[in-house]
Image (cartoon, rainbow, N blue to C red):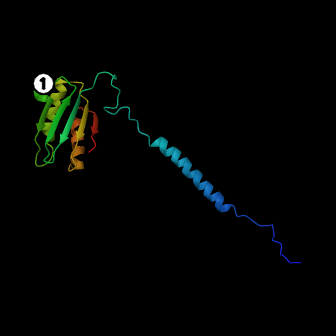
Amino acid sequence: MSLKKKKSLDFEVNLIPFIDLLSTCICFLLLTAVWINVASMNVKQAVGGQAADAGAKKPTVWVAMSQGGDLTLDVKDAHVPAKLEKFTIPGLQGKPNLELLSQAVAQLKATEPKLNTALIQPTAASIYEDIISLMDGFKKSGVTDLGVSPL
C-alpha cells in the first residue's frame, strides 16, 4: 500500500482584493455615466446643421482673416448693397483694424437689422488674441451670435 498524504480541503480565500477591484470599477462606471451626460453638446444651434426645409436663412457675415491682419467680410443671405456684400478691411500693423470693422458692422446693421451672426475663418497663422479681439469687436457692434470656423 502506498502512503498518500491527503490534502487538506480547508483553505481561505482572500476576497479583499476582489472587492477593491469591483468598487473601483463601479466608481469608473458612475463617473463615466455622469461625464457623458455633462459633456454632451447641443448642436441644434449650429449653422448649416438644419434641414433644408428649416425656413428662411438668417443673414450671416463670414470674416476671413489673413496673415497681414486684413479682414475679408462676405455677407450672405442678406439684402445689402453690392458694395457691402463682399469687401476687405486692411489690417493695421499686422493686426485687424477694429475701428474700421466696427464702422463696417454699423453700416451692415443699419442696412440689415436682423444681422446677428458672424463666423470667423482664421488661418493657421492667426494669433489667438486677434481672434478674441475680433469677437469682442463684433459683440460691441451688436452681433451676438459668433462662431469660429475650424481650420
Residue pictured at 56% horizontal, 49% vertical: 29
For the C terminus, the quadrant is top left
Q: Could you tell me which quadrant the N terminus lies in?
A: bottom right
Residue bearing the label numbered 1: 81
Tag 1: Cα neighbours inside 10 Å, few (<14), some, or many (≥20)? few
Which residue extends farthest right? 1
Quarter of the image for residue 150 reads top left
| Residue 21 in the figure: left or right of residue 124 | right
- Residue 75, how many percent across, how many down? 19, 30
Question: Where is 72 relative to 82, above or below?
Answer: below
- State left or right for residue 98 relative to residue 119: left
Say if 5 sits above or below 39 in the image. below
Name the residue furthest front. 1
The answer to whether one can see residue 139 in this image is: no
Q: Is residue 30 above or below residue 116?
A: below
- Can you see residue 112? yes
Instruction: Tell me what residue is drawn at x 24 percent, y 24 percent.
Output: 114
Q: Which quadrant would residue 97 be assigned to in this image?
A: top left
Q: Residue at x 10, y 41 (%)?
A: 90
Instruction: Please provide percent x and percent y for residue 37.
Output: 48, 41
Q: Amino acid at mark 1?
A: Pro
Q: Nearer the viewer, residue 20 or 3?
A: 3
Where residue 65 appears, as percent x and y from the top left, is 18, 43
- Image coordinates of residue 91 in percent, x first then y, are 11, 44
> Which residue is more in the foreground, 51 or 135?
51
